Image: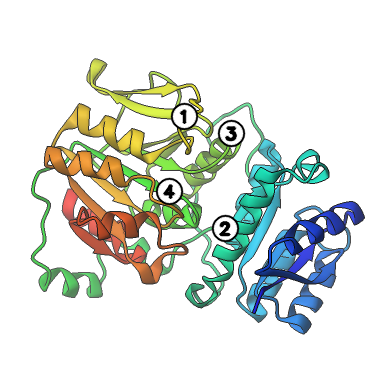
Amino acid sequence: MPVRVLVVDDSNFFQHRLKDIINEHPDLKVIGIASNGREAIEKAAELKPDIITMDFEMPVMDGVTAIKHIMANRKVPILMFSSLTYEGAKITLDALAAGALDFIPKDFAEVSRSSEVLKKKLHERLITLAGVSARLSPISPAPVIETKPAITTTTSPLRTSVPVAPPASTKAAVSADDNKSAASDNYRLKNKPKILVIGASTGGPVALAEVLVALPANFPLPIVLVQHMPENFTKAFAERLNKQCKIQVREAVDGDQLQPGLALLAPGGKQLMLDKRNGGSVRVLPDDDRVTYKPSLDITFGSAANTYADKVLGVVLTGMGSDGCKGAGLLKQCGSSLWSQDEASCVIYGMPMAVARAGLSDKVLSLKEIGPRLVREVM
């Protein structure tokens, strides 16, 4: 039986082109079209699609509000179509916080010419995401996170109408359950790490927020984050994380110094490598067409292994594909430690599965365990 898709978009042209493109795949079928958020809620309840494609800017009701209503009624995978602008990035992050699983660029030129690259990407994304509905966690009101005082900036503040917050259990450094778990778990880091490197893809924005919110302001390690995202998105994402976390978070620029309690996010469309000079810094390198992912966790992991040898703690979170597996192998060869997220708490069990199945993961943890465990092991 084909995957049943509900298309939500206010553009007549986009509705019909998208329907034609989706229906070209024998395992996909568009079963309905909605022109605004209100209609999307009604058709989602009536048709019960396997997956929904969602625009963000529509009359009557916007996409983010529609997602919250849809997810409150019935958990269903939602793929956002997003503008590749800074403002579009902020709205997309709101949508992911509201329950959307992933996003794809909304490019009218590609849609108009029926780009083969777009078709392949869209077909694969829809089929993959439609298969994860059983893994969607129950939706509950997210507690509001107290944000740090605003830092003066030339950009406008992020919208905060849809807070991303982890369950309350992850916000405490160590809960009673954590202590009980720790008592029965003899695992300890082999070496005291000098740097923490975390990578993620699909499902990563929410997962990274959950991990980082658990860390105290005096977390003793510098942190490097690699999230598969296009340009413009990483700047907005870093700003959002910085408002939510006790540690400082910002998008990395070439030459940034590595500092305890500072998380540097690899910029979209570029590669991030580590440099021991000047007490530890990052190199942000231009795009290379030979590399699939920009940024790539393999490249950052490999650089970390070359720079810090056995003093790295790598963490692989939810995501499609196997980026990070080759780099994890280099980390393990040097004697560093690697953790991976477990299947049950992943949106997509791809990247962490690759390192676990390759025998490279020292510890497999649920998402809610990772932040508190970092505090216990490193502080």
Q: Where is residue 65 in the image (x, y as percent from the top left)?
A: 73, 64
Q: Can residue 169 be seen in this view?
A: no
Of the two numbered discs 2 and 3 in the rendering, the one whose residue sits closer to the viewer: 3
| Residue 290: assigned label | 1
Residue at 48% in and 25% down: 288
According to the image, label 4 marks what residue?
A: 245
| Residue 163: assigned label | 2
Distance between mark 1 and mark 2 Cα atoms: 37 Å
Q: Position of residue 279 (x, y in %)?
A: 23, 20
If the image is split into quadrants, where does the N terminus sit?
bottom right
Q: Nearer the viewer, residue 276 or 168?
A: 276
Query: What kind of element bears circle 3?
Result: loop
Residue 368 vs 12, above or below: the answer is below
* Residue furthest to the bottom: 46
Among the 4 quarters of the image, the one containing residue 275: top left
Q: Are marks 4 and 2 in contact (CB under 8 Å)?
A: no
Mark 1, residues whose alpha carbon is within 10 Å: few (<14), some, or many (≥20)? few
| Residue 231: assigned label | 3
Q: Do the residues labelled 3 and 4 touch (CB within 8 Å)?
A: no
Which amino acid type corresponds to the residue marked 1 in the rendered image?
A: Arg
Q: In this view, does 52 lie to the left or right of 286?
A: right
